[in-house]
Image: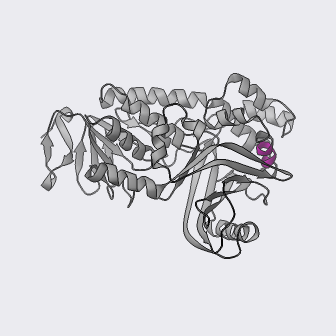
Amino acid sequence: MSLCASCIRVRPSRGGRLGLTKQRSVVVVGGGLAGGLVALRLQAMRPDLDLLLLEQGESFGGEHTWCFHDADIASGGEWILPFKTCSWPGYEVRFPGYKRRFGGAYHALRSADLHRHIEQRLGARAQTHAAVLSLEPHLVTLVDGRTFAADCVIDARGFPRGEASACAYQKFHGLFVTTAMPHGLTEPVLMDAAVEQIDGYRFIYVLPWSRTQLLVEDTRYSDGPSLDKAAMRGAIVDYIKEHIASVFAVTGEESGVLPIPLHGALIPATTPGVVTAGVRAGLFHPTTGYSLPDAVRFANWLAEAAEFDGDALSVAAADRASAHWARGTFCRRLNNMMFMAAVPEARRRIMAQFYRRDRGLIERFYASSLTQLDWLRLLSGRPPVAVGAGLRAFFAKAASG
C-alpha cells in the first residue's frame, strides 16, 4: 500500500497509523544546531506547515556551545538573540608580547538552552530517541520501525563520517567550572595563545557565564583528529590554577573534532530529493569552523520558500551550498598556508599577525563576507611563513578522497 506524500501528516496517530490532510508536511532529521534552528524558524514563520523534528540522542543539541559575533547575524539574523545563553560587550585575544580587546557584542548559545527552547516551542512535534534506519526523498524510517512520509525531508545530521578528506582538524575539550571566589573575568578570552604550543596551533578559550562560572576550553588546530581528553583535561586544570582560580569545581565537560577543509576538499555529498542542511551541506566557516551564522541564514532561506516540495527544494539547497563552498575557496587556501607551509609550532605567528589587522576586516572574515580587497590585505605585509613555502601552499590543491 502506498500513500501520497503530499497528503500525509507527519505525526503518527496511536498504533503508528497516519492521518490524512492536504497540509504540507516537513520532517527535519537531526536535532542539533542546524536542524534545531530550522525547526524553530519554521515553527515561528510557517504555521502552514506540518512540522516534525527527529533527534536520535537524548536531547537536542548534544553537549555543545556555539558562539557568534553581532556582525555575523547583522542581516536578518536577530531572531536568534532570544535563544542565546549569554552575551558580552567585547572579547580579548592574547599572544606572546601583546593582547588586544575587540568591541562588539559576542554571544554564546549552550545546547541545554537550545533543547529547552525547542521543547517549549515545538512540544510533541520534537522527538528524541528517534534513531534513523534510512532516509529517502519523502520518507524517513526509524530503527524502531516507525515511518514518516512528508512532502519535504531535511537532513541535518551533522558532518558525514568518512568524508573529511583533504582536511586538517580543529579539536577541543572544555570544562565547565565553578570557582570558590569570583574569578574577575567580565568578557571572554577568545584566544589565549600565550601558552605552550602542543599538537599544532593551540590556545585556551574562556567564557565567563557569571561571577563564578566559566567554560574553559583547550583548542588545537592539528594535522590529525586524535583527541586525548585526559591530557587536555589536565592542561585545562593547570591553566585554571595558574591564571584564574586556585579553588574550583568541575561541573561538566564538552569536546569535539571539526574538519578544517583544505583547498581541494570536496563539498560533502548530498542525497537527491532530500534537503541537506548545516555542516552536512558544508555550511560552516572553512577556517574557524563556526556554524551558527550559516545555520541562521539557512533557516531564514528555508522559511521564505514559496513551496515546500522536497524535490525542488533539494536542488535549490544544493545549489546554494555549492555557491557557499565556492565562496570559501580563499579561506581554504589560507588553511593550506596554515597547515602546509608552517610547521606546527610556527602556526601561532599566522594568527598573531591576523589579530593585528583592522577590526572591520576581522569582522568580515568571521562573517564570511571578505571582499577581494580584503584578500589582498590579508596577503600583504611581512609574511609569517617562508615566501616560497607560502606561495606553494596557497596554490596547491590537496588530494581529496
The answer to whether residue 226 is seen in the rendering is: no
Left-right relation of 204 to 255? right
- Seen in the picture, residue 45 relative to 181 is either above or below; the reply is above
Find residue 290 and report its image quarter. top right
Given the current orientation, which residue lies at the most extreme top position?
372
Left-right relation of 97 to 176? right
Residue 297: x %, y % from top left: 48, 34
Count the marks: how many? 0
Q: Nearer the viewer, residue 313 or 105?
A: 105
Residue 368: x %, y % from top left: 61, 33
Q: Nearer the viewer, residue 334 or 242?
A: 242
The residue lying at 49 percent from left, 36 percent from top is 77
Residue 348: x %, y % from top left: 79, 49
The answer to whether residue 253 is seen in the rendering is: yes
Left-right relation of 262 to 50? right
Coloration of the structure image:
one colour
Left-right relation of 369 to 361? left
Find residue 1 and report its image quarter. top left
**The C terminus lies in quadrant:** top right
> What secondary structure predominates along the stretch shown in magenta?
helix
Give the residues drawn in magenta, as a range.
Answer: 347-352
The residue lying at 67 percent from left, 76 percent from top is 247
Report if residue 319 lies within the magenta region.
no
Residue 54: x %, y % from top left: 33, 50
